[in-house]
Amino acid sequence: MSFSYDTLVVGSGPSGIAAAIAAARGKKAVGLVDDNPAPGGQIWRRDLSRPRHPDAEKQLAQLNFTSVDRLQGCRVFDHPANGVLHAECDGVAITLRYKKLILATGARERFLPFPGWTLPNVMGAGALDALVRGGLPIAGKTVVVAGTGPLLLAVAAHLAEHGARIAAVCEQATKGQILPFLTALLGEPAKVKQVLGYRVKIRGANFHTGCWPVAARGGGQIEAVIVSNGRRQWEIACDYLACGFHLIPNVELPVLVGCRLQDGFVAVDDLQRTSVENVFCAGEPTGIGGVDKALIEGEIAGLACAGALDEARHLARHMKSRRRFARAMQKAFALRTELKALASEDTIICRCEDVPFGRLHSCTSWREAKLHTRCGMGPCQGRICGAATAFLFGWGADSVRPPVFPALLSSLVSASQSDDIPTEAQ
């Protein structure tokens, strides 16, 4: 099965939605593909007990009025040639052909290993938030939210809205690190109001800066988390530990397509063009900066693909402040070196292949770790342990190879037998 588009957008989070809406203004065939069952991405994931955010409702309503062909529940796993992608939809391989490509692949949480981090009910901050949005009962449960980044406060507030008791929020960044970031917020009253609203919702919780988790303790599941401020350690009883150390961009597909990276992010120009001709990138893969940046970048990319270059350049003038905000956020929540010493010899680093920290000491690179221990060779393909080892050892991925996501053998065979000459894209 094959589909052809003038513009194909991969990722239906805020940046992807904005890109598809703008590209559709060109009156040409636009496709939007995403592995989630509905558009919105992680940030606009539907909460079953509450209405969507007004911005999400507005964008989704606009998307519904376009002629964009939406392929939800489809995961792109290969880029065999220019103008061609292979994806798997409900177990069936499909070929996606395009003239122009917009990559809006978002970001994921970064996890750092510490003793007990694999206990049941220890999970990512965003992961617990997503489960609660999907119906997980959290009312009456005691939760500690720990790690780093603006997501911690947002998650804590949302869990509190659902009846959770937030025992503490532990932010590893110091007040001195965060202050410049808060100062940058003063020029954006809406964001200040949002932050204050979050704080009001968890006003009964302790908020610790310069504080991080060092271990989780429990039998069948977590019972308490041990935290440290560098001077002393103490224990906080909890039913859940929501722990995430900011976000990292999903750049596997952009790298496979051939896009150049700069400081770990996809390098783009003022029109969101990458180093690959007719390939654009928008949102978190170009720099972690939040939904406002993602929406503007997506619209710029979509307008550029639609040929509305003057409009795109006009919007691009607003990006300087958004990127300055993104840089301030990266600096504010930079990881402290103490976090490198959390894992003990038997702490699992690669959960897919059960590789402990002690087995990695003799390795000198990510490639060597894969060859000798199978670290990063499991179903997540190094998306969790890869980020951890990059921080712990300074390792980087040597390359990205297809499939960039696990795919059925039948899909791989079907893709290999398809006609990959991009006739529609030439």
Image (cartoon, rainbow, N blue to C red):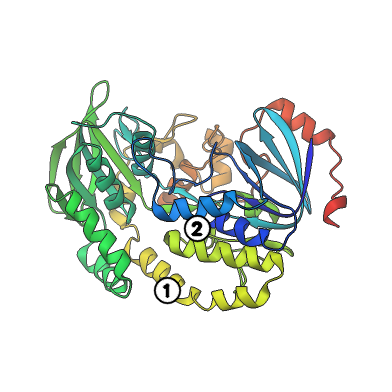
Instruction: Find residue 419 and report its horizontal and vertical position in percent.
Output: 86, 40
Query: Label 1: few (<14), some or many (≥20) within 10 Å?
Result: few
Q: Quadrant of residue 150?
A: bottom left
Determine the residue positioned at 42% across, 67% down. Answer: 326
**Numbered label attached to residue 133:** none
Is the residue 369 above or below the residue 264 in the image?
above
Viewer-nearest residue: 268 or 370: 268
Q: Amino acid at mark 1?
A: Arg
Instruction: Find residue 263 and report its horizontal and vertical position in percent.
Output: 52, 64
In the rendered image, the quadrant that contains the N terminus is top right
Under circle 2, the secondary element is: helix
Determine the residue positioned at 45% across, 40% down. Answer: 360
Under circle 1, the secondary element is: helix
Residue under label 2: 284
Determine the residue positioned at 61% across, 73% down. Answer: 312
On the picture, is 424 further left or further right than 308?
Answer: right
Determine the residue positioned at 25% across, 44% down. Answer: 145
* Cα separation between marks 1 and 2: 14 Å
Residue under label 1: 324
In the rendered image, the quadrant that contains the C terminus is bottom right
Instruction: Find residue 61 and report its horizontal and vertical position in percent.
Output: 52, 51
On the picture, is 135 further left or further right than 4?
Answer: left
Is the residue 364 above or below the residue 1 in the image?
below
Q: Quadrant of residue 236?
A: top left
Viewer-nearest residue: 135 or 105: 135
The answer to which of marks 1 and 2 sits earlier in the sequence is: 2
**Cβ–Cβ under 8 Å for marks 1 and 2:** no
Q: Amino acid at mark 2?
A: Glu
Instruction: Find residue 38 and report its horizontal and vertical position in percent.
Output: 53, 40
On the picture, is 417 further left or further right than 341?
Answer: right
